[in-house]
Amino acid sequence: MKKLNYLSLSSTGRKMSIQPKNILIMMMVLLAAAGCKKTDTGDRDYGYAKIVVKCEKKCDVSFGTPDKMNSYTVEASTGTYYQRYQRNYNVDINITPIDANQKLDLSVYSREEKQIFSNSVLRASNDTWISKILIP
């Protein structure tokens, strides 16, 4: 016959048995509790990029991924747009001057408001400026 281990409780004088089955159940409960820990990494992987476009006259702006582009028209001013993205996002930005040759300015900022791209070009009417930018 197997000998059982007993734990003595001095204040009550009772003996409590610790059986291997009880230890196994306690271990399973501890492992299950540790496995249910929720991590909060989802929101840290996402952010909003800021895209700033300046046109001297009228221009069409589209940005996003090839399967989902957002399109806007900027008329002789500055257009500021925000794009929600996941880390290491490749954004395509297309700017097409309408009606005349004009200078175009493009700036892109990451979620930390760090400028990651800035450039200016002179484009002819209906000549699309295509930029592909990786946002960290």
Image: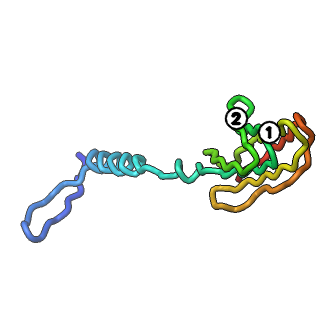
- The residue at which mark 1 appears reads as 94
Find disc 2 in the rendering and name its residue: 71
Front residue of this view, candidates 77 and 42: 77
Q: Quadrant of the N terminus?
A: top left
Q: How is the image coloured?
A: rainbow
Quarter of image, res 110: bottom right
Q: Quadrant of residue 11?
A: bottom left
Image height of 104 relative to 12, above or below: above
Report if the CB atoms under discs 1 and 2 are less than 8 Å apart.
Answer: no
Q: Is residue 103 above or below residue 59?
A: below
Residue at image coords 88%, 46%: 102
- In the image, farthest residue toward the bottom: 11
| Left or right position of 68 against 117 | left
Q: Position of residue 111 (x, y in %)?
A: 63, 56
Q: Amino acid at mark 2?
A: Ser
Q: Nearer the viewer, residue 81 or 98?
A: 98
Secondary structure type for disc 1: strand
Structural crowding at the residue carrying mark 2, measured as other residues with C-alpha within 10 Å and reported as few (<14), some (14–19) or many (≥20)? few
Residue 80 % position (x, y)? 67, 50
Give the quarter of the image for residue 130: top right
